[in-house]
Amino acid sequence: MRVVYLHGFASSPNSSKAQFFRRKFAERGIQMEIPILDEGKFEELTISGQLAVIERAVGDQSAILMGSSLGGYLAALYTARHQSQIERLVLLAPAFQFARRWQERYPPEEWKRHGSLKIFHYGDARERELGYQFAEDATQYEDEPEFPQPALILHGTRDNVVPASISSAYASARPNIKLVLLESGHELTDVLEPMWLEVSKFLSVPESIETVSKLRSS
């Protein structure tokens, strides 16, 4: 089993969720990779650029994709375009309908006029500039990517960033999607253990590294 985790917007591989899941998988002898999606160049960020980072991270091997918020949307976009490589998906509050909802939150007129927008970068704990190319590039991508692989969506019922109703509607129209709603907000950091129970069950993760060793030798 090989897992690639995609962190959220203005976040980093050091996010609490990313590190929690990395630790849980490592305890069972499973590798989890967490690419830096903005490659340290947040000002130049685009959806297309992040998809290229994911392509390099996945390489020519099969993988399971996990993604949080924008990372969840990116995981779905990537899988829709590379269906033979991805085995399963785990999406945490995925930011479907991204471009449309982004423009509602950040009207493009002033942003386009100034060329950039100040965004708080949680990975760096400071404000950074984000170029207008981010919004412009996002408009070429579909709101709700289609893929045949089994996917687990975990979404908080109190999410005020990406409403849970978006995931509910997405899952109800697709038989390959399992949706689990949790009493939480967008960050989901207060339900890490319940999420792990759902993830480990969905991916059939062994209970311990000893079990992994037995499976590999059998």
Image: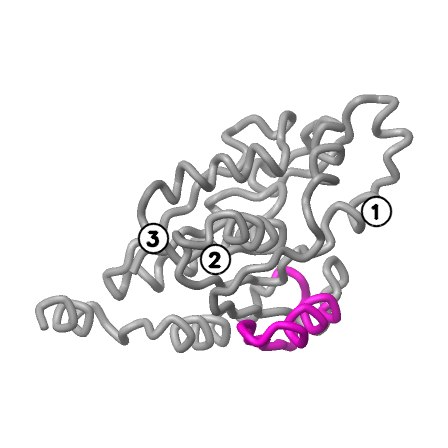
SS state under label 1? helix
- Report x, y in % for residue 216: 14, 66
Q: Residue 66 carries which label?
A: 2
Residue 64 falls inside the magenta stretch: no
Q: In this view, does 122 lie above or below 218?
A: above
SS state under label 2? strand
Which of the two labelled residues, at mark 1 and mark 2, occupies the earlier sequence position?
2
- Report x, y in % for residue 165: 75, 71
> Quadrant of the rendered structure where residue 110 is?
top right
Report the side of 137 relative to 106 (left or right): left
Q: Residue 62 carries which label?
A: 3
Residue 174 falls inside the magenta stretch: yes
- Report x, y in % for residue 210: 16, 71
Q: Residue 152 carries which label?
A: none
Q: What residue type is labelled 3?
A: Ser
Report the side of 91 relative to 198 (left or right): right
**Residue visible at 9% across and 73% down?**
218
- Report x, y in % for residue 27: 27, 64
What's the distance in space between the residues labelled 3 and 2, CA to CA?
A: 13 Å
Q: Which amino acid does label 2 sit on?
A: Met
Residue ID for mark 1: 105
**Residue visible at 71% across and 53% down?**
143
Give 125 or 117, whichever is nearer the viewer: 117
